[in-house]
Amino acid sequence: MKSKVFVLVLVLAMVFSSISKAQVSYGIRAGISLQDLNSKWPRGDDMDYDLKTGFHVGATAEMHITSDLYIQPGVLFSTKGAILENHFHAKEIKISISYIELPVNFLYKPAFGPGKLLMGIGPYLAVAIGGHVKRDDKEGKVKIKNEIAYMEWSDAPYDAKYYVKRFDFGGNLLFGYEFTKKITAQLNAQLGLANIAPKMDSGGGIDKTQAKNVGFGLSVGYRF
């Protein structure tokens, strides 16, 4: 996990270093998404979460590489999570995790009609900064820990808490349209590759706990 994060940070640093030496354009992007957690119980059984609404907003930079190819890094504030229904004696447990996210998308922008198509793929690194949990009429917070005891995990849903690791990383896909040199709209899909569930000390028992972020949504952008 640490080595993968280090490699991704190195790639991001190289990209931002290249951008500092190139002519770039800057913009802002915001949108909404439907988020889920691909999760497993400690014994490895699938957890059945429902989708929740999230959002993202932030700044992007765009650097022309060659022909119709571009690099587009960004810094976003995003919310992810999911909804768990009819578990732990609760009708609904809504989990919302807040992240500072650093995506780097490689774009292909061929001319199409009066504008350009947008097709992109790339990695992202995200840093959890908190969040909140709502259990029916009770509210609590998302806690950031790399390791937890079994009792912490089992008590968390009743106390309106949720535990995650600090770092997340994964991949992005996008498809959209550039209407003018300033205005864009795109569909986004995101697949988390990191298990954000903390390692659990289960006293020698089985720990196959898993939680990975998954989401898709729509965003609009404006380039200055």
Image (cartoon, rainbow, N blue to C red):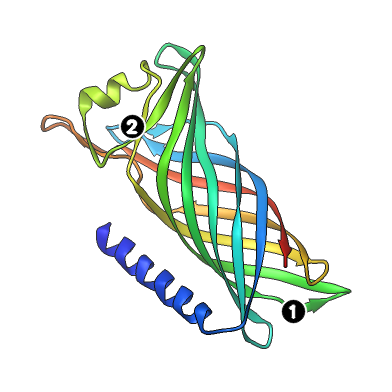
Residue 135, compared with residue 94, is above or below; it is: above
Amino acid at circle 2: Trp
Dot 2 or dot 1, earlier in sequence: 2
Residue 51, compared with residue 195, is above or below; it is: above
Residue 39, horizontal then vertical, whole percent: 40, 38
Alpha-carbon distance for marks 2 and 1? Answer: 45 Å
Please identify, in this view, whether the residue under mark 2 or under mark 1 is nearer the observer. Answer: 1
Residue 160, compared with residue 132, is above or below; it is: above
Q: Residue at x 42, y 31 (%)?
A: 47
Classify mark 2: helix, strand or loop: loop
Amino acid at circle 1: Pro
Q: Quadrant of the N terminus?
A: bottom left
Q: Residue at x 55, y 54 (%)?
A: 76
Residue 159, horizontal then vertical, whole percent: 36, 17
Q: Which residue is mark 2?
A: 41
Residue 152, horizontal then vertical, whole percent: 25, 25
Check residue 210 in the rendering and tell me which mark sits there, or answer none: none
Corner quadrant of residue 212: top left
**Neighbour class for label 1 at 10 Å: few (<14), some, many (≥20)?**
some
Corner quadrant of residue 109: bottom right
Q: Which residue is mark 1?
A: 110
| Side (left or right) of 209 relative to 178 | left
